[in-house]
Amino acid sequence: MALDNPPYQHDADSLLDIEKTWAERLAYGGRFLWRDRSGVLGIIIFLSVVIAALFSPQLAPYDPLAQDLRNNKLPPAWNVGGTWEHPFGTDNLGRDIFSRIIYGTRVSLTVGFFGVLIAATLGMIIGAIAGYMGGRIDSAIMSLINLILSLPYLLFVVFIAAVLGRSLLNVILIFGITDSPIFARVTRGEVLRIRKSGYVESAISAGARWPRIIFDHIFPNLIGPLITLATFEMSAMIFYEAGLGFLGLSVPPSVPSWGNMLSNGRKYLTSASWIAAAPGLAIMYTSLGMNLLGDWLRDVLDPRLRRSRR
């Protein structure tokens, strides 16, 4: 006897429904992005910086460390005496500023990405434990976090960097550890809200242990607010890394970074201002893209903001 609805027909229908659902979500996301032109601009800026970091050897016209003292302190191409062979000019040692700007994206994005990754991981774990366990554990953890947050952040970072020395790894670890309390506070607040939800109480009633509840039921609901926070903190870390480089506490001078370029250019602010202006504009450009991207992600991931925009 033939079956009216074979089993494989139900599987095919389910796959079609899943594909349709994802297609609808992508279409909605595309329409939402197109309505928010600042989000489009933020994504374009962010992608341009990422491409510059990934393909620096192919995009940079010169070796960022190559010196040419005969052509030192050449002005930008649009100034009198400038040339398009060096569109952003050269520094006091004749190094091409445009090439150094491109290579500097590697340091900034490396510090921002891995610093945020470490801070978010530590903050999520600490905040989730504090928010879910409550009681004395929560009080002890939050007392330590509030103590760290009460310290002047920049002075705290400068002190640790001066003790540990100049190294890219040290800068990443410094920002990752000192920035984790912010993620911990946000995570704790979200956990306190989520732990009262029905599905968490159902899991507790079913006998699920607290590590499984945190990782299976709570963490997936933290992705939205933490991704939004991560974009803003990544922008802040790029600023702080440049500040440490300006003070001579970031990567070694031989590594092209925006902070080192600012530190080198401050000696020539009156005679060759473009040496410091170019990395400053690069920092501003990257920060603008990260902030616009963060605003758009906040709108997309927060249903309340989506409804208000409608």
Image: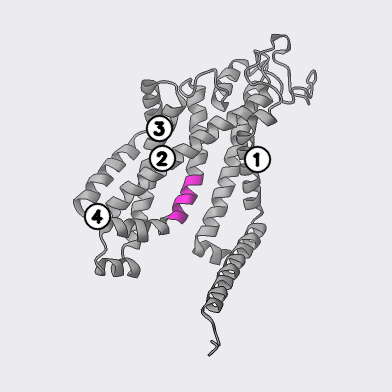
Q: How is the image coloured?
A: one colour
- Counting from the top left corner in percent of width and height, residue 269 is at 63, 19
Determine which residue is flagged by label 1.
Answer: 48
Q: Amino acid at mark 3?
A: Leu
Among the 4 quarters of the image, the one containing residue 52: top right
* Labelled pair 2, 3 in contact (Cβ < 8 Å): yes
Report if residue 123 lies within the magenta region.
no
**Alpha carbon separation for disc pair 1 and 2:** 24 Å
Q: Please state the extent of the stretch shown in magenta in the rendering.
A: 223-231
Q: Residue furthest bottom?
A: 1
Q: Residue at position x 64%, y 30% from top?
A: 56
Residue density around tag 3, few if under 14, some if 14–19, many if 20 or more, within 10 Å: some
Question: What is the CA distance from the residue labelled 2 to the residue labelled 3?
Answer: 8 Å
Amino acid type, label 2: Ile
Q: Residues within 10 Å of mark 1 (few under 14, many from 20)?
A: some
Label 1: which secondary element: helix
* Percent coordinates x, y for residue 176 in the rendering: 41, 37
Instruction: Classify mark 3: helix, strand or loop.
Output: helix
From mark 4 to mark 2, how far is it between C-alphas?
23 Å
Q: Earlier in the sequence, mark 3 or mark 4?
A: 4
Could you tell me how far apart the alpha carbons at marks 1 and 3 are, in whole angstroms? 26 Å
Pointer 2 residue: 118
Query: Is 31 placed left or right of 146 in the picture?
Result: right
Mark 4 vs mark 1: which is more N-terminal?
Answer: 1
Q: Nearer the viewer, residue 69 or 169?
A: 169
> At which x and y percent is residue 82?
78, 20
Residue that carries the numbered disc 4 in the rendered image: 133
